[in-house]
Amino acid sequence: MSQILLLVEQKENRRLLLEWLAVHYEVLLPKSTENINNYLPFNQSFDLGIVDGLALKRHWQWIAAQKQAERPVCLPFLLITPRSDVGMATRFIWQTIDDLIIAPIEKIELQARVEILLRSRQLSLTLKLSHDQLDRALQTAKELNDMKTSLLYMIAHDVRNPLNFIIGTTQVLTQYKSKLTDEKTQEMLDKTQAAAKGIDQLLEDVLLLGKFESGKIAFCLLPLDLAAFCNELVAEFQSSLKLKPQTEPVTLIFVNNSPSRMACLEPRLLRRILSNLLSNAIKYSLPNSQVIFELKLTENEAIFSVQDAGIGIPATDRERLFDSFFRAKNVGQIPGTGLGLNIVKKCVDLHGGEITLSSEEGAGSTFTVTLPIAHLAE
Ligand code: ADP
């Protein structure tokens, strides 16, 4: 119901207006118009103000301020005045008024003017709403456009480099096959395979992000033996670590103190969460350090934590860490796309879980993912 503020000092007019308007509108009627700060319901908004000449003279600055505060939405004011006073008001006072009605007031005329003024208020509110929606749509379009640009840049850069590497090594392997030792050949093949896997992973990330954007991601909770699930994943990572012999290797340790129990989670997304966190922990580790992966099961939650003693994350970068394409400023030459944690966050959100981070630059990071576990129906 529209709200009308009555600032009318002339008693008879006030009584009449109240009687006529209260049937269709909520009327806000101050007791006295002497001191505006005492009676006005400042915190209560209204859609139309009706004033008479006396109140207008006293309060035109307050009225102008209210109108200004509502801009660009229109807050109309209607002046009730005897014909003899019309010419007496100053230009400034007129600027605060949107329409006038000559006293003695005619009920029909009053209703018509009130309705017209309320309609212009409503129209300007609707316009403002559409304007805000348009603004938001523009903002989203801009974000999408920025994302596409980043994506194109990333594909151009992160696919081209390994692709060039693959083309180069395969040429060398073809041309100098007979001159290369078996060891050298194997090393080049391993590197070629790693480069191809990198491209495959990147494309998979991009496809997955596309599915998230379009809302077409499959989410199917399945009963899992979480300890076995994690053990399998850790074994895969450990064997790939062995494939990259380093002088100061990173060691991956799995700690599980929970009883073996089935819990319902989405296996493909859980795998993405854990493998992204584990590969980051290994990638950003300092040489000769440990990555500790821990699983804890409570009655209603599965808690996974991945702790490394790596480069850590600068405090100023932590807030944007889950944004797509964001990379902290201390990554140096370590390769990456800035997509992994964004995907992790989306997978965690789909589970209704949460991810937290504690980190110290130069000392290491711990990511902890807590997922609610659906119980199997008895
Ligand atoms: P990237 O492909 O760059 O690793 P992610 O989305 O997986 O992308 O991670 C985003 C950024 O978060 C990384 O570029 C890095 O700056 C930071 N980061 C993630 N995990 C770690 C970690 N374990 N240690 C240090 N920095 C990390």
Image (cartoon, rainbow, N blue to C red):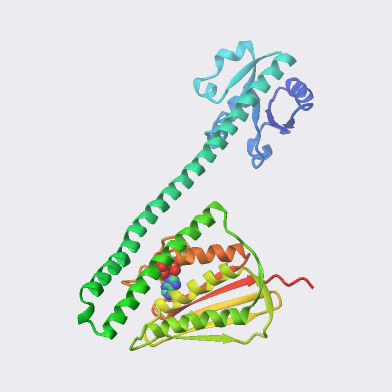
Residue 357 location (% of width, % of height): 51, 73
Percent coordinates x, y for residue 166 in the rendering? 30, 69
Residues 245 and 252: in front is 245
Q: Residue at x 62, y 30 (%)?
A: 122
Residue plotted at (25% across, 69% down): 168
Asked whether the viewer can see residue 130, the reply is: yes
On the image, which quarter does residue 76 sit in?
Answer: top right
Image x and y of residue 213, in percent: 52, 53
281 or 358, which lies in front?
281
Front residue (pair 229, 249)? 229
Q: Can I make out residue 315 in this image?
A: no
Name the side, left or right, on which 210 lies relative to 30.
left
Residue 199 on image: x %, y %: 39, 65
When asked about the image quadrant of residue 304, the answer is: bottom right
Residue positioned 24% across, 70% down in the render: 171
Q: Is residue 91 left or right of residue 55?
A: left
Q: Is residue 144 above or below residue 357?
A: above
| Nearer to us in this view, 97 or 116 | 116
Q: Is residue 331 above or below residue 288?
A: above
